[in-house]
């Protein structure tokens, strides 16, 4: 399909505890959201601020398992993304207008509704938002053919936060500079070409993911 690259933004609310498995202490709760992107929506309402509502323990883990299983994404990674994006606040809204659990921009909602297998009419509906965000993360992963299998999820997370256009451009720059094949390029190779927020975002989500894997394994 024709590529339309849409960076997503994130919000982690100050003082908001994350979730049923206990949130890792390493989440940065004050990082600003990203800006930019080429796919725009005219429906964004950045002034909308709803009261915080944290997902209950009975909701968050089953929801992550459901959407992760549906789109073949590790449950722990779904939880990791949600932790970093919204700290499990269903009503989170970033200054740039990203909404809900997985902080999806309105333009990205439009794209998902047009191209995806899920439909999102209410970005503050936990079921819809988690389905859309998890589908989109997998969609980005699927577009990253030819990269190292050990690095592919890092590239997908970098694309989720910073845009797949930036990730693809960075990979090409590294290839040109080093002579490496696409399959030899690592996230560490391209990180310096990405926005500072994305440089921090990827290892943070990977750390959250490892944390949740351990917690779930110990249950």
Image (cartoon, grey):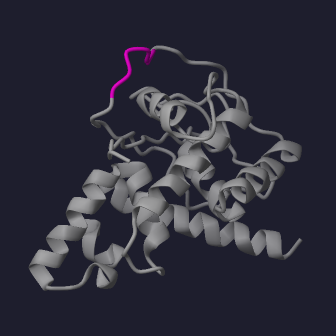
Q: Position of residue 156 (x, y in %)?
A: 45, 61
Q: Residue at x 40, y 80 (%)?
A: 148
Quarter occupied by residue 22: bottom right
Q: Residue at x 39, y 39 (%)?
A: 33
Would residue 16 be visible to someone looking at this image?
Answer: no
Magenta part, dominant SS: loop
Along the line of sight, which residue is nearer the eye, 16 or 138? Answer: 138
Q: Is residue 43 left or right of residue 196?
A: right
Along the line of sight, which residue is nearer the eye, 114 or 126? Answer: 114
Above or below 32: residue 208: below
Q: Position of residue 144 (x, y in %)?
A: 39, 65
Quarter occupied by residue 158: bottom left
Asked whether residue 56 is drawn in magenta, I would say: no
Asked whether residue 41 is drawn in magenta, I would say: yes
Above or below 121: residue 73: below
Q: Residue at x 52, y 47 (%)?
A: 136
Above or below 105: residue 28: below
Q: Position of residue 10 (x, y in %)?
A: 47, 42
Along the line of sight, which residue is nearer the eye, 153 or 80? Answer: 153
Q: Position of residue 53 (x, y in %)?
A: 72, 29
Magenta residues? 40-46
Would residue 148 be visible to someone looking at this image?
Answer: yes
């Amino acid at each position: 399909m024709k590529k339309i690259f849409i960076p997503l933004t994130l919000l982690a609310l100050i003082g908001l505890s994350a979730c049923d498995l206990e949130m890792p202490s390493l989440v940065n709760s004050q990082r600003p959201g990203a800006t930019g992107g080429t796919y725009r929506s005219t429906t964004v309402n950045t002034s909308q601020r709803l009261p915080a509502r944290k997902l209950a323990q009975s909701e968050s883990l089953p929801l992550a398992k459901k959407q992760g299983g549906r789109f073949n994404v590790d449950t722990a990674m779904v939880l990791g993304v949600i932790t970093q994006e919204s700290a499990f606040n269903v009503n989170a809204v970033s200054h740039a207008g990203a909404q809900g659990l997985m902080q999806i921009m309105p333009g990205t909602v439009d794209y998902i509704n047009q191209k995806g297998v899920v439909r999102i009419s209410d970005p503050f509906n936990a079921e819809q938002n988690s389905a859309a965000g998890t589908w989109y993360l997998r969609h980005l992963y699927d577009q990253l053919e030819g990269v190292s299998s050990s690095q592919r999820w890092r590239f997908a997370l970098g694309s989720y936060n910073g845009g797949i256009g930036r990730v693809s451009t960075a990979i090409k720059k590294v290839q040109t500079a080093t002579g490496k094949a696409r399959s030899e390029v690592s996230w560490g190779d391209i990180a310096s070409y990405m926005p500072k927020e994305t440089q921090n975002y990827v290892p943070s989500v990977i750390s959250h993911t490892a944390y949740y894997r351990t917690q779930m394994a110990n249950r």
